[in-house]
Image (tube, rainbow, N blue to C red):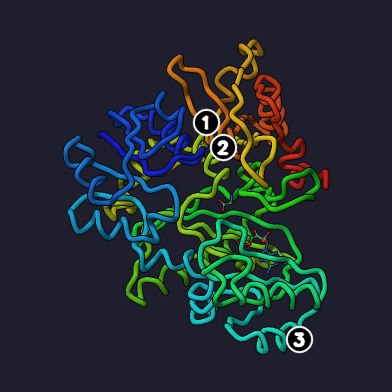
Amino acid sequence: MNILIIGAGGREYSIGLALQKDKNVGKLYFAPGNGATEMLGENVPLSDFEALADFTEAHGIVLTIVGPEAPLVEGIVDYFRERNLTVFGPTAAAAQLEGSKIFMKNFLARHGVPTARYIETDSLDEAVQFIATLDAPIVVKADGLCGGKGVIIAQSHDEAKVAAAEMLAGSSFGDAGTSIVVEEFLDGYELSVFAVCDGKDYVVLPAAQDHKRLLNDDQGPNTGGMGAYAPTPLVTDEIYAKLDERVIRPTLKGMEAEGYPFTGVLFIGVMVVKGEPIILEYNVRFGDPECEALMPLLKSPASELFYKAAIGDLKNATIAFYEKYAVGVVMVSKAYPYKSSPPAEIVIDEIHHEALKGESHISYAGVSRDEDGKLYATGGRVLVCVGIGDSIKEARDRAYMLVGQVHFVGKQCRTDIAYQALGEG
Ligand code: AMP
Ligand code: GLY
């Protein structure tokens, strides 16, 4: 089958890589793709839904997989379904779980899913009153999609009031700041849990952990994610069971009952506080870089997971994962996450380590390719070095061996990915 993947990041590259290994898959297309997805298939410079749907019809594409949240929130799945095209992702109504924090928070309250105490408001007075009832640190969030930057963890009551006032005045996050959420700070460890859903049935993937801060020891500014690994031993069978019973099932039932059955990937951002999973947020897509760590663990054909979910037939799918670990280390450009950096040529040493062959690879993200086929770092998150192994330590060693082979001016990465799992924190 020919497949179109919408998106341009390392997430989409890693999905492409998994599909490329699958003998059921014919040609891959990426819209718009990046400088490296061209090596897996063909890049298509389209973003308009109608033009994309026309393209899929003209090229015998039987499945479209939507990577990022923006086209989902804008209704690409609704449009493709109207055109009778098979597409993997949630409808615009279901994508509100990510598109609007206020929708998500109210949904959690309606269905009794545990989350932090919060209020939503567009009134500064109300925000200030609620802030006074919480202990610092205090979390202040803008509604809407802010590319992960709409969250401030204020260290004092005064800082929280200033953040709330700025967001409400629209000075920090533009239109996304007209309503805000103020919430209690959850003190625990964070997980990324993914359920691939077809509207009725679902498959839970091995739990992952991302590392959002730029620097080692979770210091520095928040980023899109500096590295991830899976499965994490921090999720015990008991926590998986609690997640299933208290979070995933009530959420999917609730979505169905409210008239928007969830299809695609439900990404559950969880904080485990004293052994109890509490929901931080939902996203309606794979995490990036979590996807880059999860795709190589998929043992059954990738097309089966995506296609059967898209046609509502997961109950007839047999989805299996390798009993291995994957660690992905993100390499970012010099000025990330503050501003863009000048293009820098990427040079990769020839791989001699036996241990790396077949047990490591690169998922490319912010890269461009020139006419000679040379790759340049042109985005913030440039690429992800992924190592696979029988233990987290082995997978991590392989990922960092590969990091050592990759060169571009200004490269940065964390050197402590998976530190919590390895008891180093
Ligand atoms: P969000 O955009 O809601 O996912 O928040 C971004 C990041 O801020 C999360 O991944 C957490 O690391 C942190 N965060 C958000 N809300 C809370 C909270 N209530 N308590 C602690 N950390 C939080
Ligand atoms: N890695 C977190 C995210 O994709 O939002």
Q: Amino acid at mark 3?
A: Thr
Indicate the secondary structure of the residue bearing disc 3. Answer: loop
Q: Amino acid at mark 1?
A: Val
Q: Is residue 321 visible?
A: no
Q: Does any atom of ligand 2 lie closer than 8 Å to the CB of label 2?
A: no
Circle 1/circle 2 CB separation < 8 Å: yes
Circle 3/circle 1 CB separation < 8 Å: no
Specify whether 23 is left or right of 381.
left
Q: In front here: 181 or 205? A: 181
Q: Is residue 239 above or below residue 129?
A: above
Specify whether 53 is left or right of 96.
left
Indicate the secondary structure of the residue bearing disc 2. Answer: loop
Query: How far across and down, in percent of the image, does residue 211 sit?
Result: 68, 48
Residue positioned 59% across, 33% down in the render = 384
Q: Amino acid at mark 2?
A: Gly
Which quadrant does ligand 1 occupy?
bottom right
Which labelled disc corresponds to residue 367? 1
Quarter of the rendering occupied by the N terminus: top left
Which labelled disc corresponds to residue 379? 2
Q: CA distance from mark 1 to mark 2?
A: 6 Å
Earlier sequence position, callout 1 versus callout 2: 1
Label 3 belongs to which residue?
Answer: 133
Give the mark toward the camera: 3 or 1: 1
